Amino acid sequence: MNVLVVEDDRKTASFIVKGLQESGYTVDHALDGADGLHLARTKPYDAMVIDRMIPGLDGLAIIRQLRAAGVDTPALVLSSLGQTEHRVEGLRAGSDDYLAKPFVFAELLARVEALLRRGGRRRQPTKLTVGDLCVDLLARRATRAGTPLDLLPREFQILECLARNAGRVVTRTMLLETVWNYHFDPSTNVIDVQMSRLRTKIDKGFATPLLHTVRGAGYMLKVEP
């Protein structure tokens, strides 16, 4: 089984990674939030161990963005902030468990094992399909009815977010946080422009549109009956 460890302290990270590997897990390690978010979104993991206070993008922000994008990989948060309000904040951000530092590895391992049992060893899909649209998360490419779509990296990120939430409304706020890493509305038409381009690329020339605007709410990727 595969575990992602996001921890900026090299000594702590080495301790966790070595212990998990000795326990039979395959482990990837990221030193900062941006790399951790990228790995979590592009590779299938059975569980994640994420430090709360890491450079660039903190652990809770990573989890919020993953949950907004439909990634439900079980997550254990590590933090030196161990008071009740901190644990509550971590759980409400979308984490599945919260372990205060300092800790002993035996407890961390037991908590990871518990996450895997509760999650039924769930594994994130590497391909998402909506109708005749296929989004390959590992190859970072998409096709419709077998025809490759010429998508720019940002367009693929948007399509991935929509496909992970197929049949559900994806709000502007979700897109800003997940794709642009904005936690505020820049008050520009950047989303409208990108969605217009994406709609042209995935719907033009096909009889059935997949990308729909939900007025006043956001956007949705779905096959209409």
Image: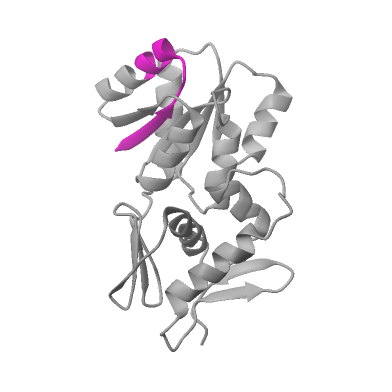
Q: Can I make out residue 121 in this image? A: no
Image location of residue 66, percent across then percent down? 52, 45
Say if 124 sits above or below 62 in the image.
Answer: below
Q: Quadrant of the N terminus?
A: top left
Q: Quadrant of residue 29?
A: top left
Asked if one can make out residue 147 in the rendered structure from this viewpoint, the answer is: yes
In-front residue for pair 154/94: 154
Whether the magenta-drawn stretch holds residue 8 is answered as yes
How many numbered tags mark residues here? 0
Q: Is residue 103 left or right of residue 205?
A: right
Write the residue at 50% across / 31% down: 33
Coloration of the structure image: one colour
* Residue in the image at 51% along x and 75% along y: 222
Locate residue 67, reporting x and y percent: 55, 48
Residue 40's place in the image compared with 79, above or below, is below
Q: Quadrant of residue 191?
A: bottom right
Q: Nearer the viewer, residue 7 or 215?
A: 215
The residue at the point 41 percent across, 85 percent down is 205
Give the left or right position of residue 186, taking residue 136 as reference. right
Q: Is residue 145 above or below residue 103?
A: below
Q: Position of residue 111 (x, y in %)?
A: 46, 28
Q: Which residues are magenta?
A: 1-16
Q: Is 101 in front, or is 175?
A: 175
Tell me residue 182's x, y (percent). Answer: 64, 44
Magenta span includes 2: yes
Q: 92 or 54: nearer the eye?
A: 54
